[in-house]
Amino acid sequence: MKNSLGYRIFGQIFFLTAVFMCLYPIAQMIVESLRRDGIANYAVVFERVNLLPNFMTSLYVVGGTLILVSIVTSLAAFSFSKLQFPAKNQIYYLLLAGMMIPTSAIIFPLFQIVKGLSLNNTPLALIFPYVTLNSIFNLMVLRNFYDGLPNEMIEAAQIDGANYSRIFLTIMLPLSLPGLSIVLIQTFLSAWNELQMAMTFINNPNLQPLSVVPMRFIQEGVSAQYSIAVRYACLVVCLCPILVFYVAAQRLLIEGITQGAVKG
Amino acid sequence: MKNKPLTGYLFILPLALLFLVFIVYPIVYNGVISFYDWNGISLTKTFTGWSNYKKVFADPVLKRILLNFLIFGVSTILIQAFLGIMYASFFIRKLRFSGLYRIFLYMPVIITPTIISSIFGKILEYNQGSLNQLLRFAGLDFLTRQWLADPNLALVCLIVINIWQWTGYSMLIYYANMLNIPQDLYEAATIDGASPFQQFFRITLPLLRSTHFTLFVMGALGSLKCFDLPYILTRGGPNYATEFFSTSIYRKSFELFDQGGASATVMIMFAVALLITAVQMRLYMRNDKEKELAST
């Protein structure tokens, strides 16, 4: 099936417009950040605003979340896919139903827990809720992946006398890495970008994750000391890590979704 | 391949524990608190029965919240589906540079919402914002507006920004599922003399039924959870024009210290979420059944 010339021209114009609309806000942000003092605005960001502690918080929170999500979700996906136990499907669907829970429905009780354990202003306050929400969100993706792995390998390993922990660690986990990578990319994005819990559980502005930092520049009083261009420069700096990540992970992410990691 | 049931339970234990502590417990907690008058801080709470619910239901803001949720949800779901299908149809016919376009159009999905809100806040600002400047430059001064401060426009602005961010997601999901439609269906239809439009409406759209459904459910839940955009850009204002469950609950808990009212609102939102999930679960189970049928 060959596309007609008219179709091709219309298509290109259509997509160039769409891409322009997508990039315009980001381009404007970059242009504004260079107003007046040019690149010197960025020097102000690094010297006076100093977002390094915020960046480190984001890194700890996301790192911890990724490690725990890999463990928790892999164990559960393996069990739901390859093991038999009573009430398996009921438990599975109950866990999946957790996806519907909005953050606002759980934030106050969790805040009480965090305060009670004196975890506020530490990365730990965010890691455990993030692990829970992301594990549930990604459980189906990983379980579907395990469903596609052959059972024969497990049976063969059992004949050789391996127990389930051995089978999980030495056979299934390595085979699940392609599925796990999608899970980890999605978890990274959602944990890195989360706002509501981040700004509530960590209220010291110097320790808040990068996702909260732009809030500072919307409240005029706090940021009046910096020019508008510097504030834009801050936004660009906040955007950089996630853009770098996207450039690195886009192939895996887009191919993963296109190949049906998320079932429609 | 037989295992002891205990083995299966042990493997799901970590997730089940997290689920109980971080999801079930908070919901139950809110359920209990919704029957008390409590500011969220003091050591004493007063049991007041259903009075929190009565107050929330008597408050005209609840109607506004439900209406905003409906308008926001329906319009974002429909427009994103329309654009997503349109993008995907071009990709499926292998338009040149499709791969590159996918990367750019998906990008807004991954950008931190606070950054997106900050940029759009600046674009929509009255004096310096580039939207109004563009209108003035084009001599269309009469069209300039206080976009986010106008009760009639604020919600529309949030809807547009949300569509800007999430269309890439619908695009990719539609594309993924269009790839699964067997090509020989189209070949057979072409031989039978069906036009491209007929093929689209009689083959493509109906076969994407479960995709529409999945995106509908995800869009509905996303609209219910909607917090970042209204919280940053409008704080639910002007005059509750952009109030959502999430912003209302957050304000009651952390700004007005009316935890009883906040918890009652949580339980109402939870009921709406349950309704959407009931629909979603039927979909999953039907899919599973189809899979079983296909494998036998």
Image: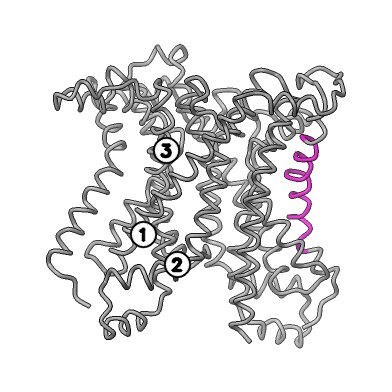
Spatial distance from mark 2 to mark 3, Cα to Cα? 25 Å
Q: Chain of mark 2?
A: B
Badge 3 marks a residue whose secondary structure is: helix
Q: Please state if B222 lies on the left or on the right of A168 as rendered.
A: left
- Give the residue at mark 2: B208
- Give the residue at mark 1: B85
Identified by mark 1, the residue type is Ile
Q: What's the magenta region?
A: B11-30
Residue B14 forms part of the magenta stretch: yes
Badge 2 marks a residue whose secondary structure is: loop
Earlier-in-chain disc, 2 versus 3: 3
Identified by mark 2, the residue type is Leu
Q: Chain of mark 1?
A: B
Earlier-in-chain disc, 2 versus 1: 1
Magenta stretch, main secondary structure, is helix
Q: Are marks 2 and 3 in contact (CB under 8 Å)?
A: no
Q: Are marks 3 and 1 in contact (CB under 8 Å)?
A: no
Residue A119 forms part of the magenta stretch: no
At horizontal 81% and vertical 17% (from top left) the residue drawn is B42
- Give the residue at mark 3: B159
In the rendered image, residue B285, in percent from the top left (x then y), is placed at 65, 67
Badge 1 marks a residue whose secondary structure is: helix
